[in-house]
Image (tube, rainbow, N blue to C red):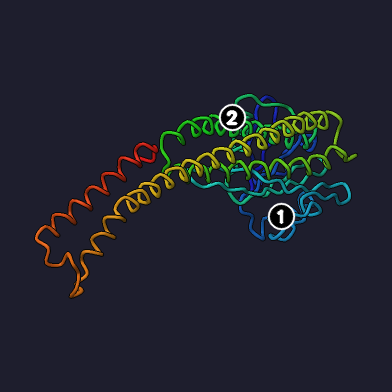
Amino acid sequence: MINIYSVVGNTFKKFEIYEFDEIKRENVIWLDVDKPTDAEIDWLRSAVGFKMPPREVFGDIEISSKYNEEGDAIYMNLSFVIQQKEDIMVEPVLFFIKGRYIVSIRYRDIPSMLIFIKRMEQSPIPFQFPEAIFSQIVHIEVDRLGDRLEILGRRIRNLRKEVFVEQSEEIIREISYYDELNITIRETINEKLRILSHFVKSPKVNAKTKRDIKIALDDLHTLLDYTSFYMDKLDSIQNSLLGLISIKQNEAVKVFTVLATIFLPATLIASIFGMNFEFMPELHWKYGYPYSLFLMVAVTLSLIYWVKRKGWL
C-alpha cells in the first residue's frame, strides 16, 4: 500500500496514487509504502526512479548495504526498535531520497513514523527538502530510544532492590529481558551512528539538515554511553543475584554437612553394636542396649554443643 503525503498550504494532506500527478512538483512529497507489491514497486520506478533492492538487503549488516548513493539518489536502510510486551523487535525501513521525493519502504507499522504523521496533522511544517522529513523521523526515533533507556534505568534501580529481597526465577527472566533490550538499543544506536555519519558527509544533503542530523548524532553518542552504563549495572545485578543464590546453596549444604557430621558417630556406634558375632562380649549383656543408646545420645549431644560453640549452627 502506498500512502502519499505532502504539505499543501497549512495542511498535511494525504493523497491517493491516482492524485499523484495533481501534487505541485515544487512541494516535498513523501511516499510511505507498507508491504509493497511488485506492481507498486514498478509504479515507484516509473514515478520517482526508485529501484527496489533485494529483500535480503533489509537484514544485511554490512554498511555498504545500509547506506548507498547512486547518481543523485540516496538509499538508507535504518532499523527501528519496536517493543511489544515481552517481544523486542528491530524492524528495518528503507529510505530513498531523490529530488523532491522521499520514499520509505516498510513491512510493519513503525511507531516513530506514526508519531511523525500525527504531529504533522496537528502542526504542519512546510519542508523545503525531502531529507528534512527523514531528519524529523530520526529525531523522533532518538527521543523514543531516550525514553526507553530512561524507563530501563528506573527499572534497573528497582531490580537491584528486589534482588536482595527475593531471588526468584521471575527476577532472572527480568534481568535477561532488560539485558536483551539494552543490547538491542545499543546495536541500533551503533547502526544509526554509522549510517548518519555517512549521511551528513553527503554533498546531496543540504546544510540545515546536516546541522539537525549532527544534533541527533550527539544525542545518540550520549545514549550510547547510557547503554554501556546500564550494561555494567545489569552485570553487577546478575553477579549479586548469583552470589546470593550461592550463599543460600552453601547454607543448605552446610546444614546437611553439619547434620551428617553430628549423627555419624551415633551411626558408627549403632553399627558396632549391631554386629552379631558369636563372641561379642556385650551381646548377652543385660545393660548392653541402654548402654549403647546412652552412648549414642551422649556423643550426639556433645557434638551438637561443640558445633554451636563454633557457630556452625
Kindly identify which residue carries mark 2.
Answer: 150
Answer few, some or many: residues within 10 Å of disc 2's Cα (few below 14, many 20 plus, some between 14 and 19): some
Above or below, comparing residue 85 to residue 276 in the picture? above
Instruction: Specify the label residue 43 is tagged with.
Output: 1
Q: What x and y, as percent, mark residue 259?
A: 32, 50
> Residue shown at 83%/32% (left/top)?
210
Residue 11 placement: quadrant: top right
In the displayed structure image, the side of residue 296 where residue 92 appears, left or right: right
The residue under label 1 is which amino acid type?
Answer: Trp
In the image, residue 238 sits, relative to residue 264, either above or below, namely above
Q: Which quadrant, please, contains the C terminus?
A: top left
**135 above or below 79?**
above
Q: Residue at x 69, y 59 (%)?
A: 55
Nearest the viewer among 288 and 48 is 288
Residue displayed at 63% across by 38% down: 232
The quadrant in which residue 41 appears is bottom right
Could you say which is closer to the camera, residue 268 or residue 105? 268
